[in-house]
Image: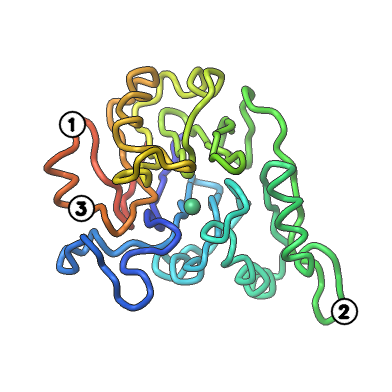
Amino acid sequence: MSITLTILGCGNSEGTPSIGNNWAECDPSEPKNRRLRPSVAVQSREATLIIDTGPDFKEQVNAHNINQIDAIFYTHPHGDHINGIDELRVWSKLNKTSIDVYGLDETLTDIKKRFDYHFIEKSPLYPAVLNAHVISSFAQEMTIADISFIPFLQDHGTCQSLGFRFGDIAYSTDLVDLSNDSIEILKGIKTWIVDGAGNNWNENPAHLSLERVVELNKQVGAEQVYITHLTRYMDYQTLMGSLPEGFAPAYDGLVLKN
Ligand SMILES: [Zn+2]
């Protein structure tokens, strides 16, 4: 299986710049500092999977000319990963199809509570457009079309989030810790895209610090680590100059292949 993983957004919940053109410590003249909310596209010869539909989802799909969506995966139900969900109704109408969405039971329960009108028909004018699929097993490979992957659990402080391994690439956004079981699933990857938004915080309760990412990667063993969920206090060039070898900040539009 060969896949292409594209970072559609590597910003944190506020993006960079945040509203009000606030760049904080990021250099506005560096294009890689312009970051949309977290999302990635995983594409193969047959299929396109999207992980998370945040507030910038429409802009991301249009910028990358994505014209096929086979499934949406939700890592967890926080707004920066969910709040573009209404675009899926427009997509459904355009493509005359319903859309399969996957996530943890608690994630889908939360999303259904807030966006019930996408899952149940409220009136013939607004048909249900999303089909919910609970992910409940974590050490096993799942396959959608020709894309195989292993979902794994992550500790996000206030809730659990899902990470995904696609061959030797893994995506881990929004976590503060990993269990030994999840570390075992990650062992053997070459490339790890991982949350580092806990940078500049003393014991961030929901996100990994860069020191902790380096520490965890001693067990995971990825050759290349891309830091994601970047805050506007994390300037691209400053990070490039200070991270250890094999570590780099992600940027919107970064394309990885295996
Ligand atoms: Zn987030």
Compared to residue 167, the image places residue 61 above or below, namely below
Q: Residues within 10 Å of mark 2 (few under 14, many from 20)?
A: few
Q: Residue at x 68, y 69 (%)?
A: 92
Q: Toward the viewer: 207 or 89? A: 207
Compared to residue 141, the image places residue 207 above or below, namely below
Task: Return the mark for residue 244.
Answer: 1
Residue 3 x/y as whole percent: 44, 40
Residue 205 x/y as whole percent: 48, 41
- Residue 48 seen anywhere in this rendered image of the structure: no
Q: Residue 136 falls in which quadrant of the image? A: top right
Residue 104 x/y as whole percent: 69, 41
The residue under label 3 is 236
Q: Residue at x 61, y 27 (%)?
A: 141
Calculate the distance from the C-alpha at mark 2 to the C-alpha at mark 3.
48 Å
Q: What element carries label 1?
A: loop
Quadrant position of the C terminus in the picture: top left
Q: Residue 144 falls in which quadrant of the image? A: top right
Q: In this view, does 111 lie to the left or right of 42?
A: right
- Residue 79 seen anywhere in this rendered image of the structure: yes
Task: Return the mark for residue 60.
Answer: none
Does the closest atom of ligand 1 sit within 8 Å of the Cβ of label 1?
no
Q: Toward the viewer: 120 or 229? A: 229
Q: Which of marks 2 and 3 is nearer the N terminus?
A: 2
Q: Residues within 10 Å of mark 1 (few under 14, many from 20)?
A: few
**Residue type pointed to by label 3:** Tyr
The residue under label 2 is 124
Calculate the distance from the C-alpha at mark 2 to the C-alpha at mark 1.
56 Å
**Residue type pointed to by label 2:** Pro
